[in-house]
Amino acid sequence: MFARLVPAAINTRPAEWSRAAIGMALGTLFSVWLCAQAFGIDVALHLLGPLGASAVLLFAVSSGALAQPWSIIGSYLCAGVVALLVARVLGRTLGSACLAAGMSVVLMCWLRCLHPPAGGLAMTLVLADPASIALGWHEMAPVMLGASALLACALAYNNATRTRYPKGAAESPARVIGGTALVTDPTVTAADLKLALAEMEQFYDVEPNELEQLIHAAEGHARRRSIGEVLASRAA
């Protein structure tokens, strides 16, 4: 039982950690700075927590479904509308803040834009600072500006650092036929998976198409290993 509590080893290298950390810091800085220029520092700093949490997803685990463009834009829109509506009807209390977060999750699931930091955003908007409260429904403007700026940074930075973003549907690689000999698909082993993970060198919050891509990569290593075993046996 205690062994299951030990975290699994990270298959990425320190270079990827640094790439994600720099992107997260720069993306958050830019989005909050832009909000501050347009709406004031008090409003901008009130959005710092949700934007920082979103930045972790967009830069560190950009392969996951929770970090795709529609996830952040749709979730911030859902959380903002629900939070402001709940605050207007039920007031700005802890209970109404938690209710807004729960309702936002349901709406995000329905619209297929689940993004965890948006739950915190909903509570943040209900329990807002005076400067944000004074904006009323116009508070949606800094919310969407921050989300859009962060997404723009993620698109630019991730692709500039050779991390494909957003993630599209992965195409199945072509089947490899080993010469004239017919080689059956071998069983993928733990060693093959380790080699495939080492090739990717990225944080993966795995979704179905990424898992399929990983398995195909591991199958490629297994197939080459089997072909080598066949050729070695013939040479012997």
Image: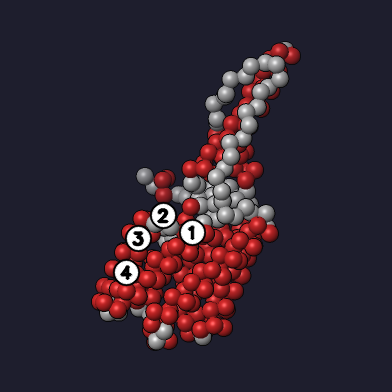
Identify the image quadrant of residue 88.
Answer: bottom left
Task: Give whichever of discs 3 and 4 has the lower sequence position.
Answer: 4
- Reading the image, the residue beneath label 4 is 100
Quick check: marks 2 and 1 in contact, CB under 8 Å?
yes
State the CA–CA distance, disc 3 to disc 4.
10 Å
State the CA–CA distance, disc 4 to disc 2.
18 Å
| Quadrant showing the C terminus | top right
Q: Which labelled disc corresponds to residue 112?
A: 2
Q: Amino acid at mark 3?
A: Leu
| Quadrant showing the N terminus | top left
Quick check: marks 1 and 4 in contact, CB under 8 Å?
no
What secondary structure is found at the residue carrying circle 1?
A: helix
- Reading the image, the residue beneath label 1 is 70
User: Which marked residue is nearer to the observer: mark 3 or mark 4?
Assistant: 3
Numbered label tally: 4
What residue is rendered at 43% in x and 86% in y? 131
Q: Amino acid at mark 1?
A: Trp
